[in-house]
Image (cartoon, rainbow, N blue to C red):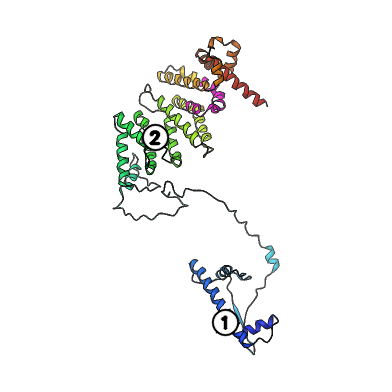
Amino acid sequence: MIYSKSTIKNIADSIGVPKLKDGITTAMAQDVEYRLHEIITEAMKFMRHSKRTKLTVTDINSALRVRNIEPIYGFETGRPVKFHKAESAMEDIYYVEDEQIDLDTLLEEPLPSVPLEVVYTAHWLAIEGVQPRIQQNPIPLDADNEDGRPPAKKMAKAQQKSQDGVETIPLVKHVLSKELQLYYECIIESLQSSDPVVKSTALESISIDAGIHQLVTYFVQYVAVTVKNNLHNLDALRTAMAVAKAIRRNPNLFAEPYMHQLIPSLLTCLVSKRLCEDYTEDHWSLRDNAAEQIAEVCRQYGHSYHTLQSRIARTLLRAFLDPTKPLTTHYGAIVGLTKLGVSMVKVLILPNIKAYMTLLSAELEKNNPQLVHDGKRCQEALLNALRALVDKEIATNEDGLTSTSLNSIQKGKLANVVGDAMAGLVFTAKDGAKIVSAVLSVDKDAKETSEA
């Protein structure tokens, strides 16, 4: 017996229960020994789960808590427990020597640092069944060796190769079936075809087919690589924009996690300096298409990402107000801000038209055919931005008004707001009276708000 009867008698005497019978002390000693065995067994489980080979006080306390027993106080895991032997005539007694603590030294010690507050962060555990390789997620076990790499992985690595031969490892690993691989290769080949019927069929397939959600990341990557490598090829850029539109409009695809990869390609097609070799080519329609898609993205995902539209508007405003940027970039910024809504025109475009027209007039005076061509496009874009201010009620009630019905006072007020050059363009427009009424109304409201 590990726990002796004499120990039970000594403890009983210390709490005021003298002269216990031998049978009682024997039963109690056996029960205490059994309870100790239970606690030690439970504590060893905590020790093994902690990857340790030495039993500590923390393990004993954890076992006691599991048994709903108050833990041991006064012992620390870091401090070794030393028992001293006190010899007596009856039996050996072991005790733990108490350490003497100097209270003055204890009070002079610096206070411990305040523990950090508990914070929570969110991250993608899986996107469409695929685990992103980020720090928060466990590293997936890749059983495939280099020689036996599956075709899907080869295709993903081939897409990551840039023109300079640098190869990057994709963050997301997709395992595609052979059917999806053949489908993807067929779609890409059709998109690169010169036959418009074949190309439109491929785009229609992307926009309506179900079960191709695993290919979304590859289509988004195709758009990004195409835009990057074909900045002066209008046909390739139009195809990339069509693919982006098809991905977003497919009701069977969940494209929201990939918008942060798609938006830079759209912005590139909107405000890039050059999108074709000859400035007379129709790259303006491509910019209009990109602006429309960006506006659709903001309307579709603005409720989930509240700062999305403001960030895009800030980017476009910087491009619009930067005098070092070419006029093609200015055109894309103006069209993009106009497509984002009337509020953007009121707050960001209208207050800056007067200063911008001064810059634009200086560019037009250089008599450069390309600058003149691009400048007229910018004037058109600004005029369309002002048309966006025309309220539907004004357009309905003033159908009979023309620019000849404007008086000199209205013309002078308009020139103070948008400048003489822009006012002249408004006067010559068919709907000039409606535009003047809308601009002056917005300017009046802005002044009243600032005074208030």
Q: Residues within 10 Å of mark 2 (few under 14, many from 20)?
A: some
Q: Which residues are the magenta region?
A: 334-359
Camera-side residue: 401 or 277?
A: 401
Q: In this view, does 90 lie above or below 238?
A: below
Vertical side of 258 occupied by 196: above or below: above
- Is 448 left or right of 276, judged from the image as shown? right
The residues tagged by marks 2 and 1 sit, at their Cα atoms, a distance apart of 78 Å
Relative image position of residue 201 (x, y in whole percent): 32, 33
Does label 2 or label 1 sit earlier along the sequence?
Answer: 1
Residue bearing the label numbered 2:
246
Q: Looking at the image, which residue is at 36% across and 36% down?
A: 206
In the rendered image, residue 346 lying in the magenta stretch gets the answer yes
Q: Residue 15 carries which label?
A: none
Query: Residue at point 47% right, 20% down?
Result: 380
Numbered badge on residue 30: 1
Left or right of 365 on screen, residue 164: left
Total marks in image = 2
Expressed as whole percent of the image width and height from the top left, the position of residue 163 reads 33, 39
**Residue at the outermost top position:** 404
- Residue type highlighted by circle 2: Ala
Quadrant for the N terminus, please.
Answer: bottom right
Q: Which kind of residue does numbered mark 1 sit on?
A: Gln
